[in-house]
Image: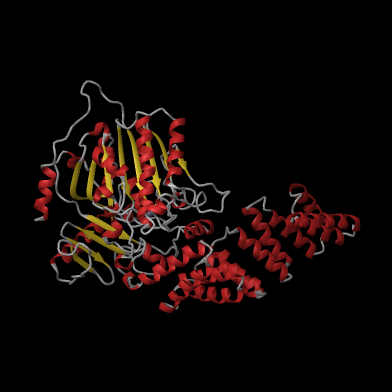
């Protein structure tokens, strides 16, 4: 019945006004891609949700084509965006985790359009898509990619890890004003609906009982500003504007508060609206099931750009005129559970059913049960067999090297991830076969608690974070993520013995975690367990040799252990990582002092004191070196300089 309804809706859609003047050949159209993060289709007004105002999206849908049933294969930002920009499933493009570089072999949207003479720029709303840290390779083909500052001046999350939608749009407008020559391909990423839900006024008031919707209304307002700008600049008419959600949000459905773990419609059904150049096909609604892998092939088709050899999607053009009505099979994939040590999930969605491959597989009859509440899985069920076959065929087609290179987020990048509420750590990616790992369905309460703890910790509410983490440990005393998080919390609170105990257990479960080992080293050094600190820091550096703070601390530990030669090795290694590191230079001088080489220490430190005339520790150490060298007057001078600087510091 439903299929018949779709056929009618699709093939006999309203007559379409083609507004293109026949006499003039239009120049190459501008292409604008707007991705709105964490946007559920069923929370947009033109998708039938009454509790939110989204006038910009509604107006764009009137000028273009609204896909009522569009699905992302991935419920997590990096993977889903890479899918939009490459037309490939996560298992094909390989970006199945944060910080995994996009392989150069996959052509991107920006790259192909740049070759066509497009001026390309990207404006991101969260550091999660920063190409310097968490999304390497995503900037390929962009003339300008608006990354976050390496050393942010603000402590607020805005400007440091996140930008408000209006800010992102303003930055895009500024770039377009400075680069008026077209054609343009501009990607704008609006991160606002992502949690924590903190819309600015007046949305914070208007939507005070449902702040997620407030963020959506705000993001829509930012989109409205962008569209008004394009109209004012005369760029709107001859442009293709594509707005799509990167994934949805659990909002507690299936016990998932946010997104990333599951593959239910709550996090995979996204809004997709395409306004075509010259308003062709205005106000059309396509009810057939389509995928976000189809967006990139559609753009290439519109611009007559040859498609890359490998694509997991197909052009949506046949739907525009009603030539095609059939639904397309939508695959789903998430490796995010692996970060917590749980099984990855794979799914197949057709009009009639959804099959989810998991340690405890699931089947939903979408016609009877659109909320995916009643699992009807049985091995012999016809839909299960069909779903399994589709998955097997998909994987059989994949080239052998499908998964991306296993990359670990650097410690800095890991902090940025935490600031955005993403926890867990990189694990080796698996194929579609469910392993002996726990089913995420049995673990989702833990994930919610871990997420709550992360956000609380980021917002300086340590008591709330600790209570959430303790609840996780009650559910699973061996949760490496919870142990590590609580260890970090105690470390921050100065409870070093407690921190050391938690981190010790965390390391026993995950001995390859360089950060946990470094943090254990910090805690042990503070409790004066110098041998323990040395071992933990050596282990950490063996796993990841380029960590400057770990090198510096290990040098200090060796100094305290009266092993100046070993300490010197560490400071030398630190200087190789960061040749200007003042801490490493002071450390190296201290190793000279410890060996009685006062003249060498003096020589080193006099140089450092010139480049760092305001550094207390430089002058304190210099006084020590002068004293050793028998230069009493110089020592006194250095000491009083140190004291003066110390005083200034506390003023
Ligand atoms: Zn996202």
Q: Is residue 156 above or below residue 186?
A: below
Location of the C terminus (image quadrant): bottom right
Q: Is residue 372 above or below residue 217?
A: below
Instruction: Please identify the quarter of the rendering in which residue 422 is found.
Output: bottom left
The residue lying toward the viewer, choosing from 277 and 166, is 166
Instruction: Please identify the quarter of the rendering in which residue 304 is found.
Output: top left
Query: Is residue 11 visible to us here?
Result: yes
Q: x and y percent of residue 90 in the render?
A: 33, 54
Q: x and y percent of residue 106 in the render?
A: 35, 46
The residue lying toward the viewer, choosing from 632 and 60, is 60
Colour mapping: secondary structure
Location of the N terminus (image quadrant): bottom left
Q: Ligand 1 is in which quadrant of the figure?
A: bottom left
Query: Is residue 78 visible to us here?
Result: no
Q: Is residue 601 left or right of residue 322?
A: right
The residue lying toward the viewer, choosing from 172 and 358, is 172
Total residue callouts: 0
Residue sitting at x 47%, y 51%: 162
Residue sitting at x 40%, y 71%: 446
Q: Is residue 577 above or below residue 277?
A: below
Q: x and y percent of residue 372 in the render?
A: 22, 65
Q: x and y percent of residue 306 in the render?
A: 27, 37
């Amino acid at each position: 019945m439903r299929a018949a309804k779709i056929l009618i809706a699709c093939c006999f859609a309203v007559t379409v006004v083609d507004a293109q003047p026949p006499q003039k050949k239009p120049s190459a159209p501008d292409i604008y891609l707007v991705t709105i993060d964490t946007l559920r289709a069923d929370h947009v007004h033109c998708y039938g949700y009454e509790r939110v105002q989204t006038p910009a999206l509604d107006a764009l849908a009137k000028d273009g084509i609204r896909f009522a049933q569009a699905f992302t294969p991935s419920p997590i930002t990096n993977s889903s965006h890479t899918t939009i920009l490459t037309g490939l499933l996560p298992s094909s493009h390989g970006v199945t985790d944060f910080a995994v570089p996009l392989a150069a072999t996959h052509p991107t949207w920006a790259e192909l359009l740049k070759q066509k003479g497009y001026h390309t720029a990207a404006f991101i709303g969260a550091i999660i898509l920063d190409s310097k840290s968490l999304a390497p390779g995503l900037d390929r083909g962009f003339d300008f990619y608006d990354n976050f500052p390496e050393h942010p001046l603000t402590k607020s999350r805005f400007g440091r890890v996140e930008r408000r939608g209006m800010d992102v749009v303003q930055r895009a407008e500024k770039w377009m004003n400075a680069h008026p020559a077209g054609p343009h391909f501009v990607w704008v990423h609006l991160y606002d609906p992502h949690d924590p839900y903190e819309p600015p006024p007046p949305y914070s008031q208007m939507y005070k009982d449902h702040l997620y919707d407030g963020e959506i209304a705000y993001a829509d307002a930012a989109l409205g500003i962008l569209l008004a700008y394009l109209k004012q600049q005369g760029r709107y008419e001859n442009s293709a504007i594509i707005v799509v959600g990167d994934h949805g949000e659990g909002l507690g459905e299936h016990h998932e508060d946010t997104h990333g773990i599951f593959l239910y419609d709550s996090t995979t059904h996204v809004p997709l609206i395409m306004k075509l150049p010259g308003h062709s096909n205005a106000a059309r609604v396509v009810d057939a099931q389509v995928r976000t892998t189809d967006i990139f092939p559609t753009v290439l088709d519109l611009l007559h750009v040859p498609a890359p050899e490998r694509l997991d999607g197909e052009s949506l053009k046949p739907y525009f005129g009603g030539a095609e009505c059939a639904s397309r099979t939508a695959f789903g994939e998430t490796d995010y559970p692996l970060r917590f040590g749980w099984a990855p999930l794979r799914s197949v969605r057709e009009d009639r059913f959804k099959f989810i491959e998991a340690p405890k597989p699931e089947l939903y009859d979408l016609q009877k049960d659109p909320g995916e509440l009643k699992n009807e899985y049985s091995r012999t069920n016809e839909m299960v067999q069909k779903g399994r076959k589709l998955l097997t065929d998909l994987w059989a087609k994949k080239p052998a090297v499908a998964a991306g290179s296993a990359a670990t987020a650097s410690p800095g990048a890991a902090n940025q991830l935490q600031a955005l509420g993403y926890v867990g750590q990189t694990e080796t990616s698996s194929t579609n076969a469910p392993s002996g790992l726990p089913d995420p369905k049995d673990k989702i309460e833990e994930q919610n608690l871990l997420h709550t703890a992360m956000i609380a910790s980021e917002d300086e509410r340590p008591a709330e974070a600790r209570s959430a983490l303790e609840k996780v440990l009650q559910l699973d005393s061996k949760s490496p993520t919870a142990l590590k998080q609580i260890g970090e919390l105690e470390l921050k609170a100065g409870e070093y013995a407690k921190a050391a105990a938690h981190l010790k257990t965390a390391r026993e479960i995950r001995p390859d975690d360089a950060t946990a080992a470094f943090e254990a080293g910090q805690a042990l050094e503070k409790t004066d367990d110098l041998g323990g600190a040395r071992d933990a820091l050596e282990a950490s550096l063996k796993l990841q040799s380029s960590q400057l703070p770990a090198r510096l601390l290990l040098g200090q530990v060796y100094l305290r252990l009266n092993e100046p030669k070993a300490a010197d090795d560490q400071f030398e290694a630190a200087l190789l990582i960061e040749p200007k590191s003042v801490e490493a230079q002071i450390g190296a001088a201290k190793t000279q002092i410890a060996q009685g080489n006062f003249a060498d220490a003096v020589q080193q430190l006099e140089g450092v004191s010139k480049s760092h005339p305001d550094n207390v520790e430089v002058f304190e150490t210099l006084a020590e070196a002068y004293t050793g060298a028998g230069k009493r007057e110089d020592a006194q001078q250095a000491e009083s300089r140190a004291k003066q600087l110390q005083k200034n510091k506390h003023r």
